[in-house]
């Protein structure tokens, strides 16, 4: 019983992650809307981090304002990464309809990790395929911000570089270039960083095979390292499945927060039941 | 007249002071570094891409292998990101256990740092001292998770199991017996919490031992004072976090500023440096060792008084126990679904950061509603720190680059991911 008491105490004291910041998130959203107008789109807030989408044309200008103006004051670029939105929301296992034959096997289809270099899928005109996601941190105001910018052309994704504004963007942009092939215009030193010297392709793209394309080994006859096509079979054990779950229907931020509170409450109810069972 | 040219040399990839596989291309003017160009990626294992091909829980083990000196802190960031998207909150006992093990991990990481930094700069003894204590933390890891390093102990919804009631003692061998065996098992007679408490009460004395060897050591000071100085403005601009930031005099610690787990319930101080050089970063780390010991004792105290669950009861995410499966059909079905398919995380994105021993370790997680992450990106503190290598090393002597690399506290598992 002591446990359930402490549980209640916990629920009373517990500050959900980023709660200290969440009072201000609404104000921040309004601030963005009034300051930047329709150059930015303010998205949902999860865990106290506001997420905004910036047009590629306004990318540098918005970032500069975010760093320099006191009300924003984002002194640090904490993180920058590329995202490839190809195949977003696609399932490898359709289980919508009941039929006489039963369900399809989960291994059908060319999901991520199920093709090799020769069979890699063609990306057919996906709009807004490559995104650059930046996380900013303001030490002064103690809040975070997520910025997203989509490269306009998926064949040759180009986004202006942020190195001039935050120098920590340097290696992160090199990484995004290496892994996703996003070109950062104005970057002083856009070399590959993670992959091997002389590597071809951009390995984190969704149409790049999980097993890679070349294998490296030491050849004792030639007395040097040789590159050969990969021989291993692509093997992914668990199919990718999307399940509609009524518990997660809530789209709005507030509803999501309510769901969290509910979850905590229901967890409490179950543990309480457990206590009774134990007692 | 002879033509005088700068000399370009390779530091690594196989160099004992490079802390792993760093290839540092140095352009030298005599003994002075003109340009430092780190080549990383030699340990790149595409962890983020691998995680995209697996259900959420199966990637926890990979997280241990990122920063393989602070295993559980990495897990913490990933697990918290999943929990946040699922909208679940682990029970308080699990939160306290996480706080406890985060601090033990910080302790072990800083011990390894002080050991390897000592060796890099020519101090052998401190290495032996630090590994003596680190071994006990490895034993705690093993007692709680079964693995000395790659624990996979934190799970969405709590921790894998409660702390054991008994700390495994040393067995008698030909070399360890009689009085010696008794001395080594002195702390191990009670529960695991007893062992951790005995350890945490004892270590401040041990930290004094390290300090006796280093803090006022003339050679140590000559090698570290005024080396690799970073101004606070530069530190922010270059994306520093953790000790690198605090060493430069910025009072910033996620455990205080954006508290997670039970850090807002425990009492501790944040040490801050003044000069921003290698010596200050050393002092900050030593003080963090002492503060960690303080937090550990508070967690032990709470955990003793408050038994309870360490996992949520939620079959949609957390597998049922074996006993429950034996006589409950629902539990059996949930178990089957969880282990063949995993759980689906609602569509959305989040960024969760923890104050890992090396700095801010963040996890950016994008889910499209599937049983696997759509994209997961790990923000490794070492990556940002190493990217400023040129700024730090320019104008210093070759031998000083060793001190600089050392106090960046790099582990290539996380830099290369």
Image (cartoon, grey):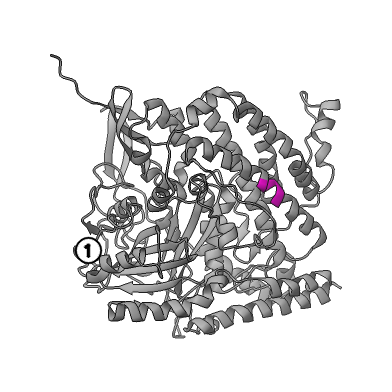
Name the residue rendered at 81%, 40% in the picture.
B187
Residue A58 occupies which quadrant of the picture? bottom left
Residue B298 occupies which quadrant of the picture? bottom right
**Left or right, B131 with reference to B249:** right
**Would residue B294 be counted in the magenta stretch?**
yes
Q: Main secondary structure of the magenta part?
A: helix
Place of residue A275 in the rendered image (x, y in percent of width and height, measured from the top left):
81, 73
Place of residue A149 in the rendered image (x, y in percent of width and height, measured from the top left):
30, 69
Dot 1: what SS? Answer: loop
Q: Which residues are magenta?
A: B291-295
Place of residue A22 in the rendered image (x, y in percent of width and height, measured from the top left):
52, 75
Q: Residue furthest left?
A: B1
Q: Is residue B74 visible?
A: no
- In the picture, the quarter occupied by the N terminus of chain B is top left
Q: Chain of mark 1?
A: A
Q: Is residue A149 visible?
A: yes
Q: In the image shown, does B226 or B171 lie closer to the viewer?
A: B226
Name the residue rendered at 52%, 35% in the picture.
B279
Residue identifier under label 1: A157
Place of residue B5 in the rendered image (x, y in percent of width and height, measured from the top left):
20, 23
Q: In the image shown, does B48 or A242 lie closer to the viewer?
A: B48
Name the residue rendered at 65%, 31% in the picture.
B210
**Would residue A12 be counted in the magenta stretch?**
no
Q: Residues within 10 Å of mark 1 (few under 14, many from 20)?
A: some
B258 in relation to A174, above or below: below
Q: In the image shown, does B2 or B349 lie closer to the viewer?
A: B2
Residue B36 occupies which quadrant of the picture? top left
B410 in relation to B305, above or below: above
**Left or right, B252 with reference to A236:** right
């Amino acid at each position: 019983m002591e446990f359930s008491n402490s549980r209640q105490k916990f629920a009373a004291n517990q500050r959900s992650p980023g709660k200290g910041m969440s009072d201000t998130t609404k104000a921040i959203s309004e601030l963005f809307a009034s300051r930047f107008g329709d150059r930015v789109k303010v998205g949902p807030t999860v865990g106290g981090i506001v997420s905004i989408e910036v047009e590629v044309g306004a990318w540098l200008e918005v970032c500069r304002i975010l760093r320099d103006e006191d009300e924003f004051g984002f002194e640090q670029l904490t993180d920058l990464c590329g995202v490839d939105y190809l195949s977003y929301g696609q399932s490898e296992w359709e289980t919508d309809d009941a039929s006489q034959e039963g369900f399809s096997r989960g291994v059908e289809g060319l999901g991520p990790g199920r093709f090799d270099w020769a069979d890699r899928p063609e990306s057919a005109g996906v709009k807004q395929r490559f995104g650059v996601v930046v996380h900013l941190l303001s030490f002064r105001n103690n809040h975070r911000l997520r910025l997203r910018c989509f490269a306009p052309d998926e064949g040759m994704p180009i986004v202006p570089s942020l190195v001039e504004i935050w120098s920590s963007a340097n290696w992160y942009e090199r990484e995004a270039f290496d892994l996703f092939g996003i070109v950062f215009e104005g970057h002083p030193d856009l070399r590959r960083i993670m992959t091997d010297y002389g590597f071809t392709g951009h390995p984190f793209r969704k149409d790049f095979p999980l097993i890679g394309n070349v294998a490296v080994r030491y050849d004792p006859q030639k007395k040097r390292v040789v590159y050969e096509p990969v021989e291993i079979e692509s093997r992914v054990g668990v199919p990718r499945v999307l399940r509609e779950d009524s518990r997660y229907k809530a789209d709005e931020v507030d509803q999501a927060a309510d769901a969290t509170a509910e979850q905590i409450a229901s967890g409490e109810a179950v543990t309480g039941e457990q206590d009774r069972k134990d007692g | 007249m002879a033509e005088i040219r700068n000399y370009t040399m390779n530091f690594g990839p196989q160099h004992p002071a490079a802390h792993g596989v760093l290839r540092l291309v140095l352009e030298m003017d005599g003994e002075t570094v003109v340009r430092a160009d780190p080549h990383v990626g030699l340990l790149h294992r595409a962890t983020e891409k691998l995680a995209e091909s697996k259900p959420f829980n199966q990637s926890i083990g990979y997280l241990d292998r990122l920063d393989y000196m602070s295993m559980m802190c990495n897990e913490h960031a990933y697990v918290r990101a999943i929990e946040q998207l699922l909208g679940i909150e682990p029970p308080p006992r699990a939160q306290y256990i996480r706080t406890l093990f985060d601090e033990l991990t910080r302790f072990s990481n800083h011990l390894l740092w002080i050991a390897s930094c000592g060796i890099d700069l020519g101090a052998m003894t401190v290495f032996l001292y630090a590994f003596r204590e680190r071994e006990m933390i490895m034993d705690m890891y093993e007692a709680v998770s079964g693995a000395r390093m790659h624990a996979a102990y934190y799970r969405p919804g709590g921790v894998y199991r409660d702390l054991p009631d008994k700390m495994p003692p040393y067995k008698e061998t030909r070399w360890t017996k009689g009085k010696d065996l008794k001395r080594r098992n002195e702390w191990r007679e009670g529960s695991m919490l007893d062992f951790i408490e005995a350890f945490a009460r004892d270590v401040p004395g041990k930290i004094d031992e390290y300090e006796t060897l280093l803090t006022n050591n003339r050679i140590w000071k000559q090698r570290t004072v005024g080396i690799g100085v970073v101004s606070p403005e530069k530190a922010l601009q270059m994306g520093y976090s953790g000790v690198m930031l605090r060493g430069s005099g910025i009072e910033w610690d996620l455990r205080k500023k954006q508290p997670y787990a039970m850090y807002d319930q425990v009492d501790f101080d944040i040490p801050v440096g003044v000069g921003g050089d290698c010596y200050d970063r050393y002092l900050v780390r030593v003080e963090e060792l002492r503060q960690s010991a303080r937090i550990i004792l508070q967690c032990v105290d709470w955990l003793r008084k408050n038994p309870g669950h360490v996992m949520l009861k939620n079959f949609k995410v957390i597998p049922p126990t074996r006993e429950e499966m034996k006589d409950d059909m629902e539990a059996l079905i949930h178990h089957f679904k969880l282990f063949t398919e995993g759980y689906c995380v609602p569509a959305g994105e989040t960024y969760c950061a923890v104050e890992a021993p090396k700095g801010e370790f963040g996890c950016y997680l994008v889910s499209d509603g599937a049983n696997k992450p759509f994209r997961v990106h790990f923000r490794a503190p070492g990556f940002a720190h190493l990217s400023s290598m040129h700024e730090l090393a320019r104008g210093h002597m070759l031998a000083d680059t060793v001190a600089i690399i050392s106090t960046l506290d790099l582990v290539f598992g996380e830099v290369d991911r």
